[in-house]
Image (tube, helix red, strand yellow):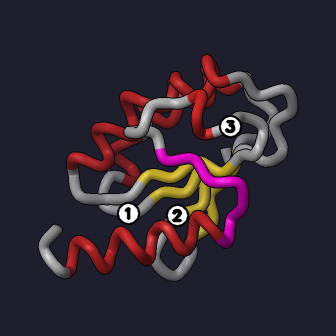
Amino acid sequence: MKTTEKENFLLIENEGEDLTNFASDLTRHHSDFKDQNIVVNLKSASNVASKELLSFLELSNVHRNDNKSFVLVTDAVGIDELPEELVVVPTLQEAEDMIQMDEIQRDLGF
């Protein structure tokens, strides 16, 4: 797992691990980054299935319930195949934009 500190989020990238195991690792280490907005870059993963992305759902829900953003970046699966609660965007720029929009909404009390 590779982490990079950005201006208003932590970028986490998978280094070749199976996505389900990667999601489990993130869940185990959640306390290390629970106070930060998270972007998980899955662009390097090939043949991503919606079932694999669902392994991030519980962590996403816990993280968002703590008023922090959790965004997955991949264009391998259409967003129509995933539940609304799982925020998935196709590019890192869109992930940054999503984080900024979430921050604005939280600042406004939504």
Q: Quadrant of residue 100?
A: bottom left
Residue in front for this viewpoint, 31 or 41: 41
Q: Which mark is residue 78?
A: 3
Relative vertical location of residue 55 with respect to residue 90 in this rendering, above or below: above
Q: Residue at x 48, y 57 (%)?
A: 38
- Quadrant occupied by the C terminus: bottom left
Tell me the CA gap for discs 3 and 2. Answer: 24 Å
The region drawn magenta spans 87-93
Secondary structure of residue under mark 3? loop
Q: Give x and y (percent) for residue 76.
A: 78, 37
- Determine contact: label 3, label 2, CB under 8 Å: no
Q: State which tag comes first along the sequence, 1 or 2.
A: 2
> Which residue in the structure is indicated by mark 2?
10
Relative to 13, say whether 101 is above or below: below
Closer to the camera: disc 3 or disc 1? 3
User: Please, what is the three-letter code of the amino acid marked with disc 2?
Assistant: Leu
Residue 73, numbered label: none
Within 10 angstroms of label 3, few (less than 14), some, or many (20 or more) residues? Answer: few
Query: Tag 2, which secondary structure?
Result: strand
Task: Residue at 26%, 73% (x, y): give it.
Answer: 105
Q: Which residue lies under the disc numbered 1?
A: 36
Please tell me in which quadrant of the rendered image residue 60 appears.
Answer: top left
The three-letter code of the residue at mark 3 reads Gly
Camera-nearest residue between 60 and 11: 60
- For image coordinates 72% across by 22% down, the residue present is 49
Tell me which amino acid carries mark 1: Gln
